[in-house]
Image: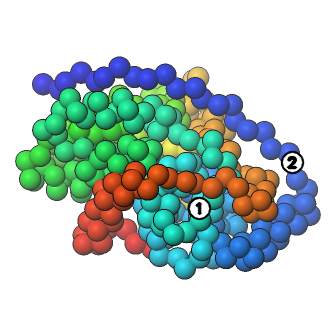
Amino acid sequence: MRQPLPPSLPITVPPHPQWPSLTADEKADLKAEILALLRANNAVLVAHYYTDDDLQELAETSGGCVADSLEMARFGAATDAATLVVCGVRFMGETAKILNPEKRVLMPDLRATCSLDEGCPAETFSAFCDAHPDHTVVVYANTSAEVKARADWVVTSSIALPIVEHLKAQHQKILWAPDKHLGHYIERVTGAEMLLWNGSCVVHEEFKAVALARVRKLHPDAAVLVHPEAPDEIVDQANVIGSTTQLINAVVTLPNQTFIVATDAGIFWKMRQLAPHKTLIPAPTAGEGATCESCAHCPWMGMNALHNLAQVLRNGDQEIVIDAAIRERAVIPIQRMLDFARMRGIGGR
């Protein structure tokens, strides 16, 4: 029988940032300045699929990287640049620094955290692990460096299933954190014995099952794409369940012309870039049949913009700093994941 989840922890969700509007000329000038600053600082821009369109475009055109968190980690470790500028949320910048202690890692705003990270404080999580010493500790990448330092494995959504299957084959009991929905999905697919932390993503938690069913009836030929951070009642309606990269690939490769997408709306930029002839419909997050793209967007991801990207490159502040002892422990489960991915041929740009 499944053990009850520990109590959930309160999360304070910030309002979505309101950035000053820019004319086309102002935006072009700001992008040109950022490109010059990247060159001057021997810096490379690494952006997540959930960030602003302009940041994703700038990362690609400047020789940087737009990717999911697994490929962001790989790219940061492979580049020769002395400075990594990470547009995403704080755990992504921390992962880059853990893997690249010799490099300077900057972010547009160090306050850009994550509800999963904030809902899994290291001290409380460590006590939870201590109470279950017979479990292998597997943590999602959306956690702090301190939580990663307590783990045996770190996983991203693109590699979690094969790693848990590997651990199950070794008859290991798994303590999973922090996302209960992703954990439950993996548990259902693999049949592994998993003890789940009670965390969730504030974006994916808001998708509405009844409203999604109504949108599906309006578009019966559409394929439903769902990130497994969404609740069961959303996952159960999916045609494709997967990481950001896997959902993007589905839009490109599936024959469907219409897709209903249940993940952060930032992903639409890459989907539209790779499949401009496809129709993308955001899954509803509130009310009956609501399909507002702005609803499904992480407010912490929204803290990344051209304005503060330029500012951090001008000033060299907002630098990720990690205690050396924490880094030495945290790099072990991260590298274990990367080695597993390499040996199994998973991912890779």
Residue at point 63%, 47% (across, down): 110
Q: Quadrant of residue 7?
A: top left
Is any atom of residue 99 visible in this view?
Answer: yes
The picture places residue 101, in percent across and down from the top left corner, at 48, 65
Q: Residue at x 63, y 35 (%)?
A: 295
Which residue is tagged 1?
105
Relative placement, left or right, of 233 versus 129 is right
Q: Which mark is residue 345?
A: none
The amino acid type, in three-letter code, at marker 2 is Ser
Residue positioned most to the bottom:
80
Task: Identify the image's colour scheme: rainbow, by chain, secondary structure or one colour.
Answer: rainbow
Q: Residue at x 46, y 39 (%)?
A: 117
10 Å crowding of disc 1: few (<14), some (14-19), many (20+): many
Cβ atoms at labels 2 and 1 below 8 Å apart: no
Q: Amino acid at mark 1?
A: Val
Looking at the image, tell me whether mark 2 or mark 1 is earlier in sequence order: 2
Image location of residue 163, percent across then percent down: 24, 55
Please, is residue 82 above or below residue 166 in the view? below
Location of mark 2 (residue): 21
In the image, 40 versus 255, the foreground residue is: 40
**Viewport quadrant of the N terminus:** top left
Total label count? Answer: 2
Q: Nearer the viewer, mark 2 or mark 1?
A: 1
Q: CA distance from mark 2 to mark 1?
A: 28 Å
Tell me where residue 328 sits by quadrant: bottom left
Q: Identify the element where label 2 is drawn.
A: loop
The residue under the point 49% across, 34% down is 118
The image shows residue 125 at horizontal and vertical percentages of 34, 33
